[in-house]
Image (cartoon, rainbow, N blue to C red):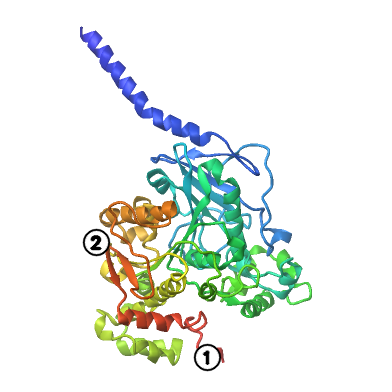
Amino acid sequence: MHKEKARMIKFWVLGLAWLLAAPALAAEDLCATPVATEQGQVAGTAAPGMAACSYKGIPYAAPPEDELRWQAPRPPAARTGVLKAKAFGPSCIQDESFSGGGKSKVFSEDCLTLNIYRPVRSGTFPVMFWIHGGGFTQGAGSYEMYDGARLAAEREVVVVSINYRLGVLGFLALPELAAEDPHHSTGNYGMLDIIAALNWVRANIAGFGGDPNNVTIFGESAGGVAVCNLLASPLAAGLFQQGVIESGGCDLVLTQEKGFEQGRKFARAAGCEESDVVDCLRSALVWKMLGPAAAGFNASAQVDGYVLSAKPIEVFKTGEFNRVPVLVGSNKDEFNMALLLMPGAMFASRSMLTKTLHKTVGQRADEMLALYSFDDYRKPAFLIGALFADGFGSRAFAAAEELSPYTPVYLYRFDWDDERWGKSMGAFHGLEIPLVFGNLKLHLRTAPLRLVLPKKAAGKAEPLSGQMMSYWTNLAKTGTPNAGELPAWPKYNTQARERIYLDTAISVAPLSAKEVERYQYFAALSIEDLRWGETEEKKK
């Protein structure tokens, strides 16, 4: 009797183990099944601990090396075998020494790859296309905090992350390069890469369960700027149906004249001043793109008459842009982490900071200080932090003001700061990213942010993270962030000027008169006006 009972227990244990293992086996089978693309088949792997498949390092364009350096991206080569997409591709050439967002293992000019995360079930799902930040000089789609497995598994979307050319390699402009281009375009190679990746998604994402007719572009910092540019670019028309701008600006582009000016400066510093300047630069070792020759290079998209006809914010005013629902916002304390890293900044006196402000922005210092009072801040340095935060906030405000007459717009401010040293660091630049992706646990492994977001703080952020994941993916699914029991997020309009505040307790309130005054002041300043250290006195 005891032996029979033991056999029955063993049978049930083995049966339960098989049932528990079955979903994992099914996931592995689905993820490993080759998917057809225009270049050949691609096989993925099951994402650890998630009901999602991942496909990493898929080329969406040919390597922009040798004669293809500073040319528009070309289609990738066809493959005969199955690409086992288990590892991320190399990150684009960059100086990653000061990056706080992640670390790369390999760098190469052969870097135009993308990564896909999909739910482990059949169906057709909205696509969320992520554009990383880093000032157009740093970053990669492979950073751990951009892992799309949880969004894919829990919210049933297909997440795509990409690499694109950075720095001098992505944004160099020269008349000689314009002359050889069939569209006379130069200086927008990084933007053309992003558009090429969107075209690849449109052609191939259906095989990965994605809906090519329902794509949401979202990005933070420089990625948010890229979203602005895509909203304004005729080349991106029809390639996306929603957009999210996180801490980005829609006026942060250069004129072609400025692009040529800094391009000439770089060429001279790189030792390429002769008539064959393009050949010289294309034959130069890649380290010159990061060395002293590139010091001070402003990596930025440019008004070239092809990718962009004008600054995006000016295009929005005409109504002649890619009209899609847009979610736009900034963080309450964008600059505070940077303040903490500046020697002595947190201990500087009012007079010292005022003097420094005059040295850096000249006569505009008095205009700025007239909008603030040191008495409103716990430390004088936080007033400087407020200036920068309002610089970001003003860009979100300006975008909402100009877009909202033509298309649905939802304005936010991210206020959550219940992390270690929250009273000093606040809701700093980029802090919303792990909440949007639901990667608070993954984020704990990313230095140095794990120091300010330990397990206890990450646990406190989980409820808000779940709400933000819902807002973002609702936009992707339906064109509005609202659904279910979430606090209602009103559309923005230029009369009520309501904004949602993303915090432990989510709230909605209109912008105050003081906020509107500050935002209007900063929004009226150009990218050159806002560049610290570039006063007229220093230029002379």
In-front residue for pair 412/272: 412
Q: Give the foreground label among 2 and 1.
A: 2
Which label belongs to residue 336? none
At mark 2, the secondary structure is loop
At mark 1, the secondary structure is helix
Amino acid beneath label 2: Ala
Q: Does 531 appear above or below 454?
A: below
Amino acid beneath label 1: Glu
Percent across and percent down for residue 295 are 57, 75
Residue for badge 2: 505
Percent across and percent down for residue 330 are 39, 69
**Residue density around tag 2, few if under 14, some if 14–19, many if 20 or more, within 10 Å:** few
**Residue density around tag 1, few if under 14, some if 14–19, many if 20 or more, within 10 Å:** few
Residue for badge 1: 536
Asked whether, in this view, residue 132 is left or right of residue 340, the answer is right
Asked whether, in this view, residue 209 is left or right of residue 70, the answer is left
Percent across and percent down for residue 157 are 44, 47
Note whether residue 95 is visible: no
Name the residue located 54 percent from the left edge and 74 percent from the top edge.
318
